[in-house]
Image (spheres, rainbow, N blue to C red):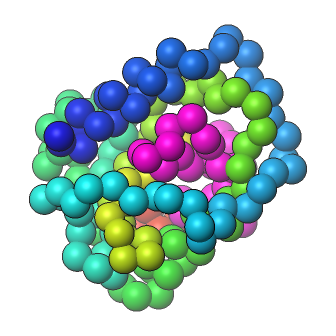
């Protein structure tokens, strides 16, 4: 199953469970290392130590994976900053009410391939991340980490 197919399947499941209102608070639970964020390997999963950043379908691009690739984070310090930014995110409380993500990132966490969806709106100080393996749970990215992610992606 392609990354796009998994995304669409997850999005359909997500939309089926969303109410018209969103409830959320800045309080939440930190993402723990014990959360199962793994998914089966695919040809688009980057080599260990590299993160592939793609434009989200919200950006008006088509579903073709290769044409959506924005760039790759390869420098170890950039990869570490990206990992820290998403792992420091706090679980959102309530029911998610989301649009299509701005970006999709393919990376490895704990030695396993992971796809995350990122909402980094230029008009918002805080972003959100959702793991493709659990599209019912969103994580609020701190203001500092949102700025960090925007800067990392902006350099691509």
Q: Is residue 23 above or below residue 3?
A: above
**As drawn, is 129 to the left or to the right of 29?**
left
Percent position of residue 121, x then y: 58, 41
Q: Which residues are magenta?
A: 121-150
Instruction: Assign the N terminus to one quadrant of the image.
Output: top left
In this view, the residue in front, 87 or 119, is 87
* Location of the C terminus (image quadrant): bottom left
Total labels: the figure holds 0
Q: Image point 24% across, 44% down: which residue?
A: 3
Viewer-side residue, 35 vs 138: 35
Q: Quadrant of residue 51?
A: bottom left
The answer to whether 116 is drawn above or below residue 58 in the figure is below
The residue shown at (44%, 52%) is 116
- Whole-percent x, y for residue 148 in the image: 59, 68
- Does 128 sit above or below residue 15? below
Kindly identify the residue that appears in the image at 54 percent across and 77 percent down: 81
Residue that protrudes farthest toward the bottom in the picture: 76
Report whether residue 98 is seen.
Answer: yes
Answer left or right for 151 relative to 76.
Answer: right
Q: Residue at x 44, y 76 (%)?
A: 110
In the rendered structure, does residue 122 fall within the stretch colored magenta?
yes
Is residue 143 visible in this depiction of the protein?
no
Task: Indicate whether 22 appears above or below 81.
Answer: above
Instruction: Name the residue at the top extreme.
Output: 20
Residue 138 lies in quadrant: top right
Question: Is 138 contained in the magenta span?
Answer: yes
Q: Position of residue 107 (x, y in %)?
A: 35, 66
Residue 31 location in percent, x, y? Answer: 66, 61
Left or right of 138, for residue 90: right
């Amino acid at each position: 199953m392609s990354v796009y197919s998994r995304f669409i399947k997850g999005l359909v499941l997500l939309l089926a469970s969303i109410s018209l209102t969103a409830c959320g608070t800045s309080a939440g639970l930190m993402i723990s290392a014990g959360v199962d964020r793994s998914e089966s390997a695919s040809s688009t999963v980057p080599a260990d130590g590299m993160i592939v950043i793609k434009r989200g379908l919200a950006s008006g691009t088509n579903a073709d994976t290769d044409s959506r690739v924005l760039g790759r984070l390869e420098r170890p310090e950039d990869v570490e900053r990206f990992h820290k930014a998403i792992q420091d995110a706090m679980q959102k409380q309530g029911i998610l009410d989301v649009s299509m993500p701005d970006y999709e990132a393919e990376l490895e966490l704990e030695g396993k391939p992971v796809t995350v969806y990122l909402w980094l709106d230029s008009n918002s100080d805080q972003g959100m991340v959702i793991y493709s393996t659990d599209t019912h749970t969103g994580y609020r990215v701190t203001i500092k980490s949102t700025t960090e992610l925007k800067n990392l992606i902006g350099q691509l």
